[in-house]
Amino acid sequence: MTVRARKPLDVEALERAVRAGERAGLSRAITLVESARADHRQTAQELLDRLLPFSGGAQRIGVTGVPGVGKSTFVDAFGHMLTSAGHKLAVLAIDPSSSRTGGSILGDKTRMPRLAVDPHSFVRPSPTSGALGGVARMTRETMLLCEAAGFDVVLVETVGVGQSETAVADMVDIFLALMLPGAGDDLQGIKKGLLELADVIAVNKADGDHRLQAEQAASHYRRALNIVEPTDPVWRPPVLTLSAREETGLTELWKVVQDHRRALEESGGRERRRRAQQVRWMWSMLEACLHDRLRRDRRQRETVAEVERAVARGRMLPTRAVDTLLALL
């Protein structure tokens, strides 16, 4: 049986396709940076180096919210408004992977029917693969590719659980937290950590019987924000109400996004934020690579497994285990 050699990827041709805004080329490039193969990682790095000078110009928006808050409906409505106004929008939807099987749903396109067929939008669901490091690496690199392809707004939708919120907030220019109406006088369901991350809070589903509840919730959030230190001294996070279903409040939200960008650009805060994000990205990548290196070599994997068993059985302190594992590197 003859095994056909794999045809090497033409990086120059892929670069041209991405810069020309070709969807097929952009999809191939994203698949390349998501690949775990060593040769693909090397090729992806070369491609990213070529495209880096053409990235960075987009408005990067992060969106989070608990399941059921209507994130996908909001993204579809908000994105449709932006593309109708002449913007090119890329949506990077982080899809949760099963911690047991590694499988993911990847169904965001079905929940964003208009953007899925909009020629001025690009929706890319990506699995987390159970690792926040994967979120940080894949999503950041995909963001750069989309910017090089000419998208001027990149929206990252989080799964809305755990540390994924922090990971996404650390790669965008503005972080939006979608909230449900009916928070209650005791502010049940509000996470202080989320309030500290958010640059804008929007209470969704402010329509029909929920309109009054949404206004009351917004009032509670405004009071809560008075005791939270803002992420930037020149910006006090506003609280809005909107309805993704009725498509009300979306224009006001976009104005807030533009006001935030203008305020941070004038103070130099936007550039400082991006520089700090780049450095933190470097350290998170270093941690991920060190972890991967320990797992790649068979002998090192065996040593790691032995150390883990020793720690689990109380025969070795975690501090001693760390020293042992670092010695392997």
Image (cartoon, helix red, strand yellow):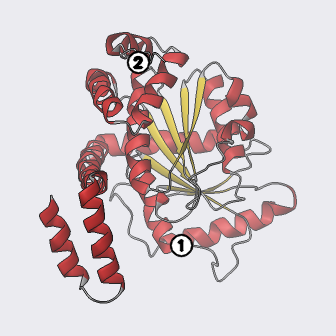
Residue appearing at x 66%, y 23% in the figure: 84
In terms of secondary structure, where does tag 2 sit? loop
Residue 233 vs 103, above or below: the answer is below
Task: Please tell me which residue lies in front, 95 or 279.
Answer: 95
- x and y, in percent, of residue 77 in the image: 70, 38
Residue appearing at x 44%, y 61% in the figure: 197
Residue 301 vs 175, above or below: the answer is below
Q: Give the tally of numbered discs.
A: 2
Q: Left of 252 or right of it: where is 248?
A: right
- x and y, in percent, of residue 47 in the image: 31, 23
Residue appearing at x 42%, y 49% in the figure: 134
Question: In the rendered structure, which amino acid carries the disc numbered 2?
Answer: Arg
Question: In the rendered structure, which amino acid carries the disc numbered 1?
Answer: Lys
Tell me which corner region of the image, top left, top right, bottom left or bottom right, holds residue 110: top right
Quadrant where the C terminus is found in the figure: bottom left
* Any part of residue 249 in sight: no
Q: Earlier in the sequence, mark 1 or mark 2?
A: 2
Determine crowd level at label 1: few under 14, some 14-19, many 20+ residues with C-alpha closer than 10 A: few
Residue 42 vs 61, above or below: the answer is above
Name the residue beneath numbered marker 2.
6
Numbered badge on residue 191: 1
User: As drawn, which residue projects farthest toward the bottom?
Assistant: 314
